[in-house]
Image: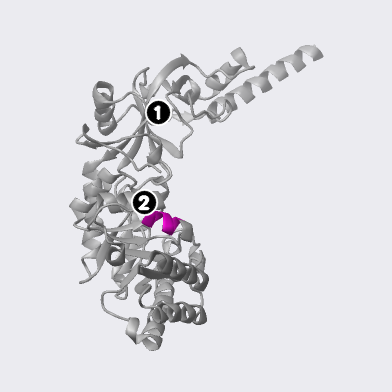
Amino acid sequence: MKRRRLLLGGLGLGAAVLGAGALLRPDDEGAPHDAYFAALNQELKENGPMRPCLLIDLDRLDHNIDQVVASVARHRGRRYRIVEKSLPSPGLIDYVMRRSGSRRLMSFHQPFLNHDAARFPDADILLGKPLPVRSVERFYRELKGGFDPSRQLQWLVDTPERVAQYLELARGLETRLRLNIEIDVGLHRGGVTDPAMLSMMLGTIAAHPDQLGFAGFMGYDPHVGMGVPRILGTPQELLAKAMGLYQGYVDQLRGEHADLWHEDLTLNTAGSPTYRLHEAETLSNDISVGTGLLKPGHYDLPSLAEHHPAAWIATPVLKSTGSVRIPALDERSRVLSWWDVNQRQTFFIYGGNWMADYASPRGLHANAIYGRSSNQEIVNGPASMGLAVDDLVFLRPHQSEGVLLHFGDLLAVRGGRIQEQWPVFAG
């Protein structure tokens, strides 16, 4: 009798545990492609390459470009500079140039810089980071076409030592280099940090007018718009501090080297996270934006709330294998799909392991137990997604420059239809 009561009690406890467990089971998170992704899915199945590809939505891109142009135009004389590394495709850059009316680029990579000079011979180009002097020399050796660096190119310099290196190169090449000085306005990623440092750099430039010209300042400030806890300062407070530092360096230039000052200097600042905040200041005249035009996942920021995601990875489903099965667990894996409705469908996609998040259909996710793959990624979800072999799944990249170069030609789409294919930069 005692044993019977114990057994019944144990069964009761087990039933209670199972009942409680059932109440804690995850809800169905799935849903089929919405109308937007359903149209892209059908278009790619009919006319796409049926391999991993990267889509640029032109309707959304137009909207984002217009946001930037309108913001920059709020200050007379302020100009928009297109950040090439975030849009590493000549066709994409050309599209942004035509829509925005800007012929100004910011370049970060010597091979891309040579492509820019050849493809856009009328462009005004500012380097976004200091390059080793050997890279600068290589640019001149590989330069082709009518692009004139002595008028159209600004090299970024960050230290007195780099200015000296560029001076020696200019002598060796028998040319004149235009130098833009990087200033630290709070990011602390290099650049001028004190007046004495700036004095040395300006002094060298002023003493060698045949080899060097002063083109302006660059003060990059993404920390103002992202990554800094609010307890350390609001974006407005951080911007005011950054522009105070910027103004101090401009005042020093005008006080120590009035001969180098002129109204056509490039006073560059901003970036996608902060460009809208610069509507509140009047010092800068050159605003850089790139990634914000595509708004990948890491740029879901308050300052970009009016921008729309415009870039998607699309890849086909290769296999559908039913409920999740983990190697070695085999049939015991059934408990996973019993417990979680979102594990009841298993798919293997073409490629994977990208810097991206699954966007559609809703409920799709990578399997952390099985592991990641760049060849055939396993993904799971509920039956409510309505996904089948040869359907496309869509992912939203985390960033642009680290992702766009991995897929070959970009597919430009409008209204759910492929319009153009744009090769990406090589090198």
Render colour scheme: one colour
Q: As shown in the figure, which amino acid type bears the numbered disc 2?
A: Glu
Is the residue under label 2 in contact with that under label 1 (CB below 8 Å)?
Answer: no
In the rendered structure, the answer to whether residue 353 lies left or right of residue 56 reads right
- Report if residue 46 is visible in the image: yes
Which residue is nearer to you in this view: 421 or 155?
Answer: 155
Q: Residues within 10 Å of mark 1 (few under 14, many from 20)?
A: some
Question: Is 343 one of the magenta-colored residues?
Answer: no
Dividing the picture into quarters, in which one does residue 397 lie? top left
Q: How many marks?
A: 2
In magenta, the rendered stretch is 135-142
State the CA–CA distance, disc 1 to disc 2.
53 Å
Q: Residues within 10 Å of mark 2 (few under 14, many from 20)?
A: few
In the rendered structure, the answer to whether residue 326 lies left or right of residue 2 reads left
Q: Is residue 293 above or below residue 336?
A: below
Tell me the tag on residue 264: none
Quick one: SS at disc 1?
loop
In the rendered structure, the answer to whether residue 183 lies left or right of residue 332 reads left
Which residue is nearer to you in this view: 144 or 416?
Answer: 144
Q: Position of residue 184 (x, y in %)?
A: 47, 70
Quarter of the figure that contains the C terminus: top left
* Residue to which mark 2 is pinned: 142
- Report if residue 184 is visible in the image: no
Q: Residue furthest right?
A: 2
At x 19% / y 51%, what residue is drawn?
A: 99
* Residue to which mark 1 is pinned: 30
Q: Position of residue 132 (x, y in %)?
A: 48, 59
Which residue is nearer to you in this view: 97 or 280?
Answer: 97
Quick one: SS at disc 2?
helix
Which is nearer the N-term, disc 1 or disc 2?
1
At x 34% / y 22%, what residue is drawn?
A: 391
Q: Nearer the viewer, mark 1 or mark 2?
A: 2
